[in-house]
Amino acid sequence: MSEEQPKLNIKDEIVNEAADCKKDLRCLKNRGEGLCKVDTFLNNKILFVRCLNSSYCSFRLPFGDIFVCECLVRKEIYNLYKI
């Protein structure tokens, strides 16, 4: 039996910043499952991630073989939950 993931509580003002998310904020609905994996987070501003799938995301920018994630929700998930 798998352990249920905790609910991710992100402030409404941060969620509203990602209102145009093409993935319909699946990261929150799935309690963090399927998120791009954090490689490095510099100065709590620049989040480098390795994406698990190639589906389109308007918040990621290619940077070599990884991506820079500009999603405020994703950054907050990492800041609060380290996932």
Image (cartoon, helix red, strand yellow):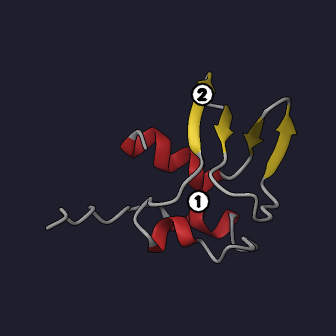
Label 2: few (<14), some (14–19) or many (≥20) C-alpha neighbours in 10 Å? some
Residue 41 - label: 2
Percent x, y of residue 64 = 85, 29
Q: Secondary structure at mark 2?
A: strand
Q: Nearer the viewer, mark 2 or mark 1?
A: 2
Q: The residue under label 1 is which amino acid type?
A: Ile
Q: Quadrant of the N terminus?
A: bottom left
User: Which quadrant would residue 58 be assigned to in this image?
Assistant: bottom right
Residue 26 vertical position relative to residue 34 in the rendered view, above or below: below
Q: The residue under label 2 is which amino acid type?
A: Phe
Asked whether, in this view, residue 68 is left or right of residue 7, the answer is: right
Residue at (52%, 64%) from the top-left corner?
A: 27
Asked whether, in this view, residue 38 is left or right of residue 78, the answer is: right
**N-term mark: 2 or 1:** 1
Residue 25 - label: none
Q: Secondary structure at mark 1?
A: helix
Residue at (64%, 77%) from the top-left corner?
A: 24
Residue that badge 1 annotates: 14
Asked whether, in this view, residue 17 is left or right of residue 15, the answer is: right
Percent x, y of residue 74 = 58, 51
